[in-house]
Amino acid sequence: MRHAGVTVLFAVDVVPLTVLPEGVEAISAAQLPARIASGERVVMIAAGLVIDDRALDAVLNATAPAMLVCDAAAPGAVCLERIDAATFAAGVMVLPAEMVREQAAGIGEWDLGSTLIRTAAIDSATQRIDFLALPTYAPSRRRDVPLIWARPETADEARAGTDSLILAAQKGCLDWPARFLHPWPENMLVRLLAPTRITPNMV
């Protein structure tokens, strides 16, 4: 999120004692209106979502309001929740501050994420960005890379998500040692270092 240019990070209505990344503040939906300034764009990502940076960029580059969606009938359709007979919400939105403040102020016991999905979905100004229609070619990796969308709920699903991320990170156009010899030790080290504060530049 920070790499994408988001400067303030909130976790809204999290389960008590949830461990949050450094710099992320836990607040309630009722506190949001006082923390969002008029004219700002608010990026919302579903809790626990592992999302491809290309999908995030596509939504952020759109004019608010915009939401990531998926054709419900498409093979490999991804789903946060259904918004109409043919479409799933895919867990990422960028919304104008006024929309978020208005809904958060009167949210009561309702779920803020679902309420904002419904509000954005019925707004004729909302751009719908189809996740499965995004290009799979990644210029920085010089190859086609399948788009990543996962919402792991178990340890096995989390490990599978990590596997997908590691496989997607490898660049194309490699010589034979980089293609056949390097991946095993590289991937093992990435698994060990990814949860730490060690960055690629430090390595």
Image: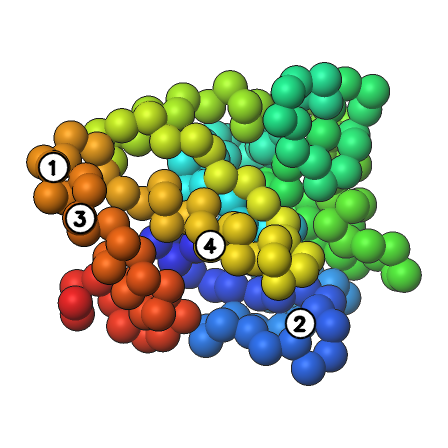
Q: Circle 2 — which element?
A: strand
| Closest to the observer, 86 or 74 | 74
Q: Position of residue 31 (x, y in %)?
A: 70, 69
Amino acid type at mark 1: Trp
Q: CA distance from mark 1 to mark 3?
A: 8 Å
Amino acid type at mark 2: Ile
Q: Choose mark 2 or mark 1, whichever is in front.
A: 1
The residue pinned by badge 1 equals 176
The residue under the point 52% across, 51% down is: 161
**Pointer 1 or 4: first along the chain:** 4
Above or below: residue 107 compared with residue 15: above
Q: Which mark is residue 162?
A: 4
The residue pinned by badge 2 equals 27
The residue under the point 68% across, 82% down is: 17
Q: Circle 1 — which element?
A: helix
Q: Is residue 56 visible?
A: no
The residue pinned by badge 3 equals 181
Q: CA distance from mark 2 to mark 1?
A: 50 Å
Q: CA distance from mark 3 to mark 2?
A: 47 Å
